[in-house]
Amino acid sequence: MRTSSRRYPVTDGTAADGIRGTAHGTAPVPLSVLDLVTVGAGRTATDALRTGVELSRLAESRGYHRYWVAEHHSMPGVASSSPAVILAHLAAHTERIRLGSGGVMLPNHAPLVIAEQFGTLEALAPGRVDLGLGRAPGTDGATAAALRRTERLHEGADDFPQQLMELTRFLDDDFPDGHPYRRIHAVPGPVQATSPGGVQSPHRPPLWLLGSSGFSARLAGTLGLPFAFAHHFSAQNTVPALDLYRETFRPSEVLAEPYALIGVAALATDEEKEARRQVLAAALNMVRLRTGRPGLVPTPEEAEAYEFSPMEREFVDSWNANVIHGTADEVVSGLDDLQKRTGADELMLTANAHGGDVRVRSYELIADAYGLPKAPAA
């Protein structure tokens, strides 16, 4: 796959300026937010989306670098089926923080549709939109089949590099002469600059590849793209995937050196006991999801009263071993250790809990513990 000379038409700095963040306070690397837009029992999707607005404004005011939402489907407890819609809403309530997908599941969509959606987002929030792409469906097989209108799901994943190339060409508007899509243009996009009186936007969303194994790590390295790894649900593969990404990395017009962030499940509370209660509820939600019973995130009280089977208890213990939780000082210590162990260039924190107030408080406590700035919210 080629790299286009028109890929990142920036006017002030390099392409990497839209990728690399700045660490604030005593944080070892830039900190960011992954919002799964979780819906707790007794709450609504409206509540979850309002929490997202509150959280994005907090993240912006406290120096978190970026705020991503992830595509999921057919999960009652996760209201992020439409990342582009959510990001447009967040763009209207923020001014500086980078907004993006963590990620859009490319095989679920026509590349032209994604190019149009994120071209629109770039027009709404110039210079602060990221386009993170994954190749998993973000749901179960039956739902994926409904999304893709096909039962041959493996073909979508296998065709991911080709879909990525097609999406890139739509974003850059540079299909070669003779290509069947040569006269098709993603709008908003570069074609508007070629129209009479047109002006070229100086920005285009940086592409990120997301993964939980080695496939996207290798592809991101080969293409010289930034890479995001899902440590929060595939911790055993984190170090091997990051090593593979760095080993296969080839400098590009996007990046001269590798840049990798990892998604980290982290929850800070004022008291350690409360953190344990909250992560138990989140773990019960995962038990139900993994056993084909997806639902709303249960309350801590429901989780405490639940009778876990030996197999479920084993899963919960294994799952929570990779959730950094406790008081702010305990979480900061865990994050520092994880960053040293993995060498991650950025930590993207996801706080899974029943209530939105708990999630917002967690990011505030972590910001305080690291001494992040306290700028007034936009």
Image (cartoon, rainbow, N blue to C red):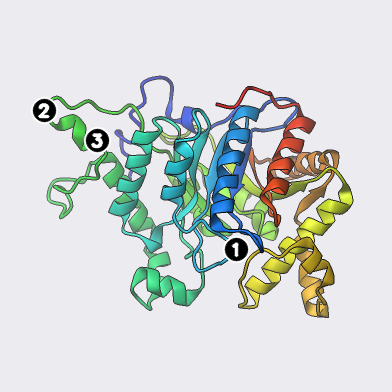
- Image point (14%, 24%), residue name: 197
Tell me the CA gap for discs 1 and 3. Answer: 38 Å
Residue drawn 43% across the image and 21% down it: 13
| Percent coordinates x, y for residue 253 in the rendering | 40, 33
Mark positioned earlier in the residue sequence (1 or 2): 1
- Could you say whether the residue bearing mark 1 is in a helix, strand or loop? loop
Residue at which label 3 appears: 190
Residue 221, x across and y down, in percent: 50, 46
Q: Taking 94 as reference, is 88 above or below it?
A: below
Tag 2–tag 3 contact (CB < 8 Å):
no
Instruction: Tell me if mark 1 has few (under 14), some (14-19) or many (20+) residues whose alpha carbon lies within 10 angstroms of its own.
Output: many
For discs 1 and 3, the disc positioned in front in the rendered view: 1
Where does residue 165 sit, x and y in percent of width and height? Answer: 33, 51
Q: Amino acid at mark 3?
A: Pro
Front residue (pair 26, 327): 327
- The CA distance from mark 2 to mark 3 is 13 Å
Relative placement, left or right, of 90 versus 237 is left
- Per the rendering, the mark at residue 77 is 1
The front one of 20 and 189 is 189
Above or below 111: residue 187? above
The amino acid on which the numbered mark 1 sits, given as a three-letter code, is Gly
Q: CA distance from mark 1 to mark 2?
A: 48 Å
Task: Indicate the secondary structure of the residue bearing disc 2.
Answer: loop
Which residue has dot 2 on it?
196
Amino acid at circle 2 = Pro
Which of the marked residues, 2 or 3, is nearer the chain's N terminus?
3
Mark 3 is surrounded, within 10 Å at the Cα level, by few (under 14), some (14 to 19) or many (20 or more) other residues, namely: many
Is residue 13 at least partly visible in the picture?
yes
Q: Residue at x 61, y 40 (%)?
A: 55
Quarter residue 109 falls in: bottom left
Give the foreground label among 2 and 3. Answer: 2
For the point 66% across and 49% down, the residue is 356
